[in-house]
């Protein structure tokens, strides 16, 4: 789990979603917006239509923050220009996430890897 200062609050998430630059994968949309801090901040939005209960929503949210922590994306600069961003990952309504199905977990991880791999090096 990453520290609280690296997570976006609700007000900041709304700001990023309003002034965003989206990048799409199959089931997750990555939105980014420049910040004036010396580190990146992250949030994940998982709607109630994508999960059956709050337990599953928290499971995937914790999985997302563990992914960010293990990849050490908090202090990495974006585009190698020392520019830092606020990132909001939005899970599309069409996907049904289920923590009991390995296929669902794998597709979630695969989309996160795709977004980070393809978007981290480009602007």
Image: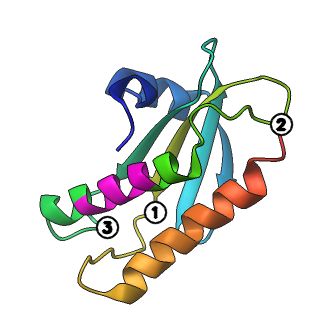
Say left or right for 32 vs 70.
right
The vertical placement of 36 against 16, above or below, is above
The vertical placement of 52 against 41, above or below, is below
Which badge, 3 or 2, is on the more N-terminal residue?
3
> Which residue sits at x=56%, y=62%?
112
Q: Secondary structure at mark 1?
A: loop
User: Which residue, given by chain and number where applicable, does mark 2 sit on?
Assistant: 79
Question: What is the crowding at mark 2: few (fewer than 14 residues within 10 Å), some, or many (at least 20)?
Answer: few
**Between marks 1 and 2 in the image, the one whose residue lies nearer the viewer:** 2
Circles 1, 3 touching at the beta carbon (< 8 Å): yes
User: Which residue, given by chain and number where applicable, does mark 1 sit on?
Assistant: 92
Measured as percent of width and height from the top left, residue 119 is found at: 75, 51
Q: How many marks?
A: 3
Residue stretch rendered in magenta on the structure: 59-66
User: Which residue, given by chain and number where applicable, does mark 3 sit on?
Assistant: 50
**Between marks 3 and 2 in the image, the one whose residue lies nearer the viewer:** 2
- Mark 1–mark 3 Cα distance, whole angstroms, equals 7 Å
Q: Quadrant of residue 99?
A: bottom left
The vertical placement of 64 against 19, above or below, is below
- Mark 1–mark 2 Cα distance, whole angstroms, equals 26 Å
């Amino acid at each position: 789990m990453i520290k609280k200062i690296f997570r976006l609050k609700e007000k900041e998430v709304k700001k990023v979603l309003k002034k965003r630059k989206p990048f799409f994968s199959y089931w997750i949309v990555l939105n980014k917006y420049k910040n004036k801090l010396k580190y990146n901040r992250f949030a994940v939005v998982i709607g109630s239509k994508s999960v059956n209960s709050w337990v599953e929503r928290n499971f995937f949210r914790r999985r997302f923050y563990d992914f960010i922590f293990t990849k050490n994306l908090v202090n990495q600069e974006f585009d190698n220009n020392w520019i830092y961003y606020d990132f909001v990952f939005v899970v599309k309504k069409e996907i049904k996430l289920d923590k009991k199905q390995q296929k669902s977990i794998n597709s979630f991880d695969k989309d996160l890897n795709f977004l980070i791999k393809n978007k981290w090096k480009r602007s």
